Amino acid sequence: MDTLVDKALVETVFGRLDANTRVMACNGHKAPQSPGLDCCDCEIKDQSVCCALDPDEFEVLEKIGRSQGYPAKSTIFEQGREAGFVYNLTAGALRLSKLLPDGRRQVVGFAMPGDFLGLDFEPTHLYTADALTPAKVCQFSRPGFSEMLDDKPRLLRRLMNMASHELALAQEQMVVLGRRTAEEKIAAFLVGMRKRYGRIHGPSVHVPLPMTRLDIGDYLGLTVETVSRMMTRMAREKTIVIVPDGVRLLDVQRLERLAEV
Amino acid sequence: MDTLVDKALVETVFGRLDANTRVMACNGHKAPQSPGLDCCDCEIKDQSVCCALDPDEFEVLEKIGRSQGYPAKSTIFEQGREAGFVYNLTAGALRLSKLLPDGRRQVVGFAMPGDFLGLDFEPTHLYTADALTPAKVCQFSRPGFSEMLDDKPRLLRRLMNMASHELALAQEQMVVLGRRTAEEKIAAFLVGMRKRYGRIHGPSVHVPLPMTRLDIGDYLGLTVETVSRMMTRMAREKTIVIVPDGVRLLDVQRLERLAEV
DNA sequence: TTTTGTCGTTGACGAGGATCAAAAACTTCC
DNA sequence: GGAAGTTTTTGATCCTCGTCAACGACAAAA
């Protein structure tokens, strides 16, 4: 089973790293030719798990990992297939979804840069990960990564914290799915997305939505039509503005009131 | 945020322990007078996390932990309150629930003997844990337990696996909440409870239900009335029989078809 | 340019489950 | 044993959201 962790949490967990640490990590080794890791160019290296490592530990990581790009709409891994890797998303956005035999679908999450997938070590993937935008990941072979975990308890401890934070988010999503109205679901979704983007690009009322209305519906337990209706209603009521590729939040307070715990 | 782990998983993770290990753990120390741990009498000591420890490690555990009984309907800990302990349920059943400000409630899980709560280290509890039956827990102070984790990577590794298994269950519950009909939800619930009891007491078509219909409704995102109606309908259709304190499953195949992934 | 496909929006209608109300069954406690 | 409270069941009615259908906007392909 795969685990997804939040970049902002990584930061919390590891503490913001100073420039020194970063340079050490980057200078501690020669960037290998492709395939291999390309960490000096990594957009999020100062926030990802990697920065928890000493230079020598970093060298091990590099041996078992490599950078990999995926075009939009491509599949990183598929539900039911053998799980060979652990992934750290460094750019782009992913949709994580579970499919029922009759075609019904539940989106269990959206991954953003800094998120980690596959921290569990189930033999097969329990959901499918598709790229919503062109995406870049660092991928590590499971046996190698697992061995490394046994060797680096500090790293393991942090991943543990990330996993339990992920569980907290999943339980919060249960409340949304089980006990909230369509309007509240949309509000909770928009506020949640804003929060996640805020951690990466700083707070803003502009919320990019790389996923379709269908994806949002499958995430919130609604149909496309209901998602569309609710969003146009919110736009009519001047709570949001629908813009290409996302929304602009006009009345954040109202949305937060609708979404409040 | 609190983590709940499945006893059967512990067993999987640790491997079934041989009698030798058990005796060692139990003999490795003198059982302290109350308050303190009372491990020699523990019903599930051969399956709980404790058995992952050497005798000397066990001694540390005993220093920071103590056994504690809770009567039915009492609260072990409450959403929003400061989280001072980590809990290992050794007897009874708990309801784990989140409350919205307006009174709506979502049950995020039911804990059974062997389950672990509070593995995360959030400052406050994110849900309330109430005893459905008289319950017994081993509770450990967080600072002490945390220190121990830093010291025992093998223990940490196992707890990590338990946490990510818990996340997998949470994601499966998202599918139930978001994409299943009332009938399918009940079927999934009954099949799931049967599976959990089966791991503790061996497979049986008799499934005890220590929670009320209201609890079940709050777990599945339904009202009491719908839960009651669906269960009586299943009884009318000879799929189940409703007995005092639970149900007897007559047509497991049909239930599993309704609940299938 | 036209064609084709995907995605988003809107409307009409209906069903599944919620809500409201009340009685029955079961517990708990004098 | 009876009284009071809780839990479960059942019925009648309502309403939110799903379903079905059609159209418009937009992008990529021909």
Image (tube, coloured by chain):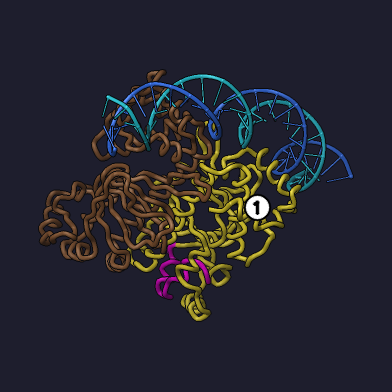
Chain colours: A brown, B yellow, C cyan, D blue
Q: Position of residue B202 (x, y in %)?
A: 63, 67
Front position in the image: B17 or A211: A211
- Can residue B85 be seen by looking at this rendering? no
Residue occupying the point 53% across, 37% down: A179
Quarter of the image holding residue A253? top left
Disc tally is 1
Percent position of residue A66, x then y: 22, 59
Please provide percent x and percent y for residue B127: 49, 45
Q: Which residues are magenta?
A: B46-64
- Dominant secondary structure, magenta: helix
Left or right: A101 in relation to A233: right
- Left or right placement of residue A204 versus residue B22 in this view: left
Q: Tag 1's secondary structure? A: loop
Residue type, mark 1 in image: Pro
Instruction: Work out whether A256 lies above or below B96.
Output: above
Question: Around disc 1, counting alpha carbons within 10 Å, would you say few (fewer than 14), some (14 to 19), or many (20 or more)?
Answer: some
Residue, far bottom: B20
Residue at 48% x, 68% y is: B12
Q: Position of residue B137 (x, y in %)?
A: 54, 59
Closer to the camera, A8 or A77?
A77
Q: Residue at x 61, y 63 (%)?
A: B198
The answer to whether residue B182 is seen in the rendering is yes
**C26 displayed left or right of B109:** right
Chain ID, mark 1: B
Q: Is residue B51 magenta?
A: yes
Residue denoted by label 1: B210
Q: Is residue B225 above or below residue B114?
A: above
Q: Nearer the viewer, residue B243 or B37?
A: B243
Nearest the viewer among A102 and A258 is: A102
Residue found at x 58% / y 55%: B192
Residue B84 vertical position relative to residue B60 in the rendered view, above or below: above
